[in-house]
Amino acid sequence: KKIKKEMRVLKRVKPKGIKNLNNNMIIRKYTNKQGIKEIEGERFQTDQLKMRGTMNLKNYKMNQMYKEIQINQQENRNYSGYRLVKRKIEHTIGIRAEDDSAWERRTPLTPKHVESLLQQGIDVVVEESKTRCHTNEEYREVGAKVVESLSHVDTIFSVKEVPPHLLYDDKTYVFFSHTHKGRKQHRSLMERILSKNIRLVDYERITNNYGKRLVRFGHFAGNAAAIDLLHVLGERLLVHEKMTTQFINLGFAKNYISLANAKEDIQANGDNMRRYGLPASLFPLTITIAGNGTVSKGIQEILNLFPVKYVTVEELQGLYRKKKHVTRASPETRYIYVCVAEPKDFLRHKVHHTFDRAHYDANPSEYESTFAHHILPFTNVLFNAVNWDEKFPRLLKTEDLEKLDDLPLMAVADLTAETNGSIEFLEKTTSFEHPYYLYNPVQKKITENKMTGKGFLVMSIPNWPTAFPKTASAAFGDKLLPYVLPIVKQDKSVPEIERAIITEGGKFTPNYSYLQEVYKYDDTLQAYEDPKDVLLLGSGLVTGPIVEYLTRHKFVRLTIASADEKQAEKLCNDYGRDQATIVKLDAQNHEKLSSLVSKHDVVLSLIPASMHVPVAKLCIQHKKTMITASYISPEMKDLNDAAKEAGILLLNEVGVDPGIDHMCVMQAFDEIREKEGDLVSFQSYCGALPSPESSANPLGYKFSWSPQGVILASQNPAFYKEAGVEHRVDGKSLLFSSTPLTKKTTYAPGFAFEMVPNRDSMKYIDFYGFDKSKIKTMIRGTLRFPGFCNMFRAMKVFGLLDDDTRIDFLGSTDEISWKNLILDLSPFDRNLSDAELIAKLVGHIQKGLFAKFQALGIPQTEAECLAGAREAVTGFIKLGMLNEHEMIHREENLTVMKATCNLLTKKLSYQVGERDMIFMHHEFIVNYPHRESREKIAATLCVFGDNDPDGFSATAKTVGLPVAINTILHLRNKLGDLSGVCGPTEKIIYEQTMKALEEEGVTVTENRQSLFLDEYFDD
């Protein structure tokens, strides 16, 4: 009885995570009331049990119980009090957090697969993710480690391709890279993979001896695409044709709990169709699936839940001849007619007009598609599920549609997601947020999120399988699991994996040597171009991406010149790739600076702005190009003629603001002019902010540079125009003129911003080439999170931003408390209690705010000012300003504003693990007089800093990359004959820079919306 009682004790204290593992694994630490320690070995032995203290009777009985459990386990009796687990760790793999989009929730290996791998002696490290379909805790429960970074792991598994700048050196990566296709858009990724000595294994290339893919998501892509296209077809028929069908009852695939749940719903609607049929006017509802592989099977699986009849291509054509004989009562209306078209049905030899599969595979260029003429005219809904490459003929060309009148086509789903690929008119893919667009083949026009109008709906979501993330991941992992160990062990005896290795040792493997020719442009430059010498002045926060990008190109020899030798050395070690050297330099040392400039082909000036002009003068003297991210100052402008005479380029403003903001505007305005539109409104907002999860502080802001610089920038005068009225704002009043953007704009519903007008907006009318007579709104503003302006307003009225009041430390005093300073700046009695002081502060600041708003003529009630004062004083408390233990230390010429800045630097600087964000938004309102229409064009850029502590901040990426990109463009003679003082508004600069930024993951998203002519202005 006592032994049984002790066993019940053990059951109660059984650790979490002890599962059914084999006897030959490590014995987990097992603790009971007597403190039994961890025991190692394959079997329990009585003499191995070491007890704390003297072996008493109870301990002896416990030993006897363990013996009995051991014997019974050997006899296969089921005891749950403990479990023997001995595991030898031989290899470690990492599972990466997906960052392709917020909707990408798949994982290559689920917790179930991880548990199996752990039993095989493979340790699994999982990168922390808030969006993955399986939680971090689920992975922990099976024994995986959840970490912030995989930098220490040698083999990393992902689903989607890894952004080039986030790849680690000397690793094995396993993901869908698509690089074997040799497309231009993958050049940057491939270049980085080779330069980082990465062993790349591509799931798509894990095949059997006959070329059949063994690890894939395709079936679920077909499932999701079928559900989504039928859903939008139902909407199109309802809205455009005024016709109700069972399809309108379906949801989008992503909105179902699971695939099984989706099938149940579809089955119910299918039963309804069997009973009631479809409108007679819709007969025959024809669906054509191009291809009969795994993806096609997934589509068919969903369609089969409806009443379907499969027809041949010949039968498809004959259906339309029955149309006039069909009524609502006809049994034919109770079916969907599906045609699965295989290559033999729509491909033919250009000369012999026959199809031979073996000959076609060897000579695809000798064949052409007849799909447009023999199948498309009889198709209402098209699914393109044919794998395609550039060497194969297109299924449909854009010109094919121009020759066809009155197409019955209502909707197209292209599951290849290849823009201008198998379906040439697929100019852009869609997304879960914006799943379809209307395409007019006559006008070749795309209209976003519109159901009505001429044309047909197009869907092409690259990551369709993630609509069912758990189901898809489980099936994918089942297929992948047998190949994990061979991948990790680099086992050359597994041909399926050997066929999938694209790069190894910084080179293409023999199976992919053809890519050397495909990527010949870059490889030629890497191998044979004459070396070029680049001088980087500075080693500050934004220089990391510059060094990393430049040293990807083997012809670049980089010199980092900086006063901070340690920081320069770190840059060199982290990103230099043996192509960078460092030089200690005081930029004020004119002689040494001149010598360095003379020895280099290009000079990148990332030192304080006051030094750019002296550097530019030296570049003119030595006839060297200079590139910087800073504004073009009047003094820099004055060097234009001298630079042109020297035949050199002084390129400025190639950062983010200025830089990317101007480039984005110029690209959009080029299109507006091309379409003969009149720009009537332009709003441009940009902010360098902490990411939302890092912004929880009184200002909603973090400082990566001097707070004094931020404060001074918030006191510049502003000049802008809104709805035809010009506004001038005095610099001292700027913070009182902030505007909340939550209701005024709809471009970022996930964010709450406030906007402060940014300097002189009106000068940009001429700068961009806008028509002054037609533009009624012209605003450029700085974005901040709510709370920023209110806090600084309160600081201002209380005197905390006073740079004229100095703090004198008397005698031997080296520090004073912040509470004392607050009391000294206020008219209050020093003997107030904390509660009384807070109340007095709130009242004092409220009066100051109300008086200031009144003086400026800005509508603000006393109640609103009271709320603002309370919020500000709460912020003062959080910052330690009312704390007698928060000290201000002695400093020469210390002013109140300097003390405030020191406190903000201390409290609100970025910490390890925190990341920043760049958010930029341009909004154009354009009239098109010749077609009596108005359009709103919204261009948005949102870039986050890397989660990895060793990664780059958003600011560093968006400032540094444009500088580095233009350096390479110049060294490759891609900037033409530009000379003199230039900026980012040159077409040859912004077109190439924006394209290269997109390859680096810095992408501008564009949305368009048709407006009524009087929606914004009353003309």
Image (tube, rainbow, N blue to C red):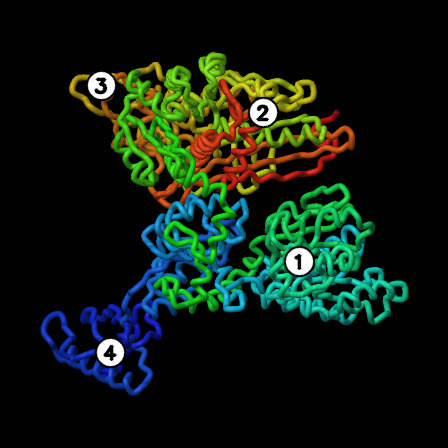
Point 66% across, 50% down: residue: 436
- Location of mark 2 (residue): 779
Point 74% across, 61% down: residue: 353
Instruction: Select label 2 or label 3 by which is in front.
Output: 2
Q: Earlier in the sequence, mark 2 or mark 3?
A: 2
Alpha carbons under labels 2 and 3: distance apart: 46 Å
Inspect the image, locate mark 3, and give the three-letter code of the amino acid beneath it. Answer: Phe
At mark 1, the secondary structure is: strand
- Quadrant in the rendering for residue 571: top left
Point 62% across, 58% down: residue: 363
Up the image or down, 32 lies above or below 1009; here it is below
At mark 4, the secondary structure is: helix
- Location of mark 1 (residue): 384
Q: Position of residue 914 (x, y in %)?
A: 38, 41
Q: Earlier in the sequence, mark 2 or mark 4?
A: 4
Q: Position of residue 890 (x, y in %)?
A: 23, 22
Q: Earlier in the sequence, mark 2 or mark 1?
A: 1
Alpha carbons under labels 2 and 1: distance apart: 45 Å
Up the image or down, 614 lies above or below 665; here it is above
Q: Is residue 798 visible?
A: yes
Q: Nearer the viewer, residue 262 or 344?
A: 344
At mark 2, the secondary structure is: strand
Q: Is residue 698 visible?
A: no
Inspect the image, locate mark 2, and give the three-letter code of the amino acid beneath it. Answer: Ile
